[in-house]
Image: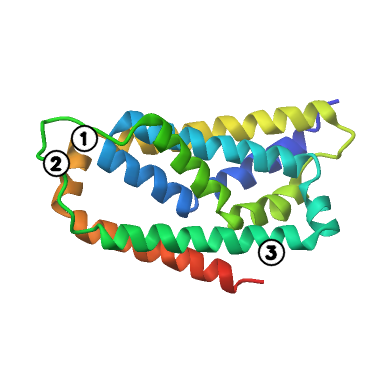
Amino acid sequence: MIDLHALIAVALIYAVGVMSPGPNFLAVAQRALVHGRAEALATAAGVITVSALWASSSLFGLAVVFKLFPWTHLVLKIVGAAYLVWAGVKLWRHARVPLPIDAGGPLPGAGLLRAYRAGLATNLSNAKAIAFYTSIFSAAAPAPDKTLTLWIALGMVLVIAMLWYGVIGVALSSGPFARGYRRAKAVIERVCGVLMIGFGVELAASR
């Protein structure tokens, strides 16, 4: 039997969680504005890949691992905080570096593989996401013996993530947004840098 109540709870909780502004959103948005749609979607694919890992692990017992080996969560938190601070400092330092002359379309980027890896790294370092999956999300998960419901829940998570990050990647890579980004590049990147550093510091200070 499919646990419809559990599926609705998982969908609602995940939708709220994934749409909350954070490092993943910033990574996809910044890639869309600077490098265009293809790289934004590649970054989104990296974020979604890790989301699938966290969601499946949560649905099938990641919280148990952290309970048995508490040091694993601490290591992930420290590494994640360090990466977010590094990414924020890098954004701040390069904020005033001019972009190439606008040729009327998306900027040539650093490559789809690099964009995908950026999405992977951002979400792997996002220990807040791990905390979300092992607490609220895990609590809403279907019972372990309801295998079919668990797989359907995982599928819903992937669909919601693809829709959300896909919309961000497509919308922010459009011409008007890209041109506006060029005009306000220094301010936008420094704000994003401060936010990334803030996420990292908050993560390092959290218990």
Disc number placed over residue 100 in the picture, else none: 2
Query: Is the residue marked by circle 3 packed among few (<14), some (14-19), or many (20+) residues within 10 Å?
Result: some
Q: Tell me where residue 100 appears, x and y as whole percent.
A: 14, 41
Count of numbered circles in the view: 3
Residue position marked by numbered label 1 in the rendering: 107
Indicate the quadrant containing the C terminus: top left, top right, bottom left or bottom right.
bottom right
How many angstroms separate mark 3 from mark 1 (CA)? 39 Å
Q: Which residue corresponds to the image point at 59% horizontal and 58% vertical from the top-left?
A: 128
How many angstroms separate mark 2 from mark 1 (CA)? 8 Å
Q: Quadrant of residue 108?
A: top left
Query: Is the residue marked by circle 2 packed among few (<14), some (14-19), or many (20+) residues within 10 Å?
Result: few
Q: Is residue 23 visible?
A: yes
Q: Tell me where residue 19 appears, x and y as whole percent.
A: 49, 47
Q: Is residue 151 left or right of residue 86?
A: right
Residue 150 vertical placement versus 130 (above, below)? above
Q: Which residue corresponds to the image point at 83% horizontal and 58% vertical from the top-left?
A: 67
